[in-house]
Amino acid sequence: MAEEASELRPPRRLIGVESKRKKLKLQEQRERLYGDRDEDDDDSDDAERDESVSYWFDLNVGNRKRLISTWGDNYEIDLFGRLGLHCYNLQKGTNLKFVRWEKHGIESTAHVRNFITLEAKDEVSDSLLSFQTMLSDASYVPGSFKWTTCACRLRGNERVDDTWDDKAVADFYKVAMPKWSSVEHLASENLKYYVVQDSELQENDWLHLFTEIAFYAKKRRLLPASPPVEIEKVVVVTEEDTADAREKLRAKNAVFYISYKCEDEDHKATIRRTMDGKPEHMRLEVASDFKG
């Protein structure tokens, strides 16, 4: 009977191969979804077994080694971090301020994904907070940006949902980026627009961030530090209904027509902000008056 049973069982070597295949497939799924590996993997780094580790943000995506806190000085990473804070503030109704970024990891696939840990300040409680944001950069045309924030949260270990739900965005915001338009032209098109007041430019410093990003796009990313931009006029167009016209400024889906000065020159930019309804998600598309 023992001999008959042994004949029915597949060879132990094949069982081992199949087990490894299943384990490898599971590991690949975990890496794709969570950015981590099975704790039982023989080649896992000790850091991956540390529950305090925030995957993707604390580990290098490529080699799974710990990211070092560099507290770097890179203007582009500053912009990524500040945009993540803007998304968080808009969705949470907070007003956290960017202080400096601590860690930066990168993964290059079809798009370039940036994983940033930064220091933010809560001016209400006068406290410093550890903040995380992930931004996908799909910018290919000179003078234009397409930056998608897929994570913006206080430090944690939640999975990043990096799938953008394009179907959830209204068609009005999915057409080609609109060209610059004057108020007169917007009125002739019967669009719902709002001219931002001077006092609101001071109260909403993220408009300055949008303007910086527009100028950064125009300069082909060749800026070492924040430029001295001066906003002259902002007009907001949105399909969202608001009881107060001023609330259009904070519409989750809107197009901004910004005119500004920098380096004694006049500039214009069209910026589109959209959200797909998922927490921590926001897309910013920028078209500057690029020439050259």
Image (cartoon, helix red, strand yellow):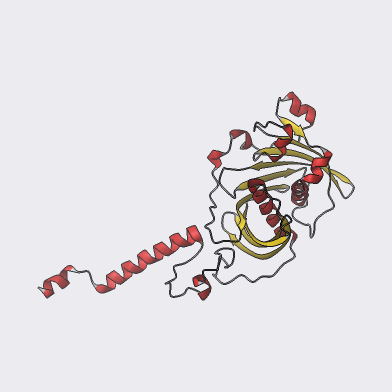
Q: Residue furthest left?
A: 1
Taking the spot 32% from the left edge, 70% from the top edge, the residue there is: 17
- Image coordinates for residue 272, horizontal then vertical, percent: 68, 41
| Residue, far front | 125
Q: Residue 27 occupies which quadrant of the picture?
A: bottom left
Exactly how many numbered labels are in the figure?
0
Q: Looking at the image, which residue is at 71% across and 25% down?
A: 189
Position of 267 compared to 10: left or right?
right
Query: In the shown orientation, is residue 230 left or right of residue 59?
Result: right
Left/right of residue 19 with respect to residue 251 in the rendered view:
left
On the question of residue 140 being in view, the answer is no
Horizontal and vertical percent position of residue 255: 70, 38
**Relative to residue 72, is residue 172 depicted above or below?**
above
Q: Residue at x 68, y 57 (%)?
A: 81
Q: Nearer the viewer, residue 226 or 245?
A: 245
Q: Is residue 157 visible?
A: yes
Quadrant location of residue 240? top right
32, above or below 203, in the image: below
Q: Position of residue 23 (x, y in %)?
A: 38, 66
- The residue sitting at 72% across, 49% down in the picture is 142
Q: Residue 243 appears at what percent x and percent y?
A: 68, 31
Q: In the picture, residue 268 is in which quadrant?
A: top right
- Left or right, residue 231 beside residue 32: right
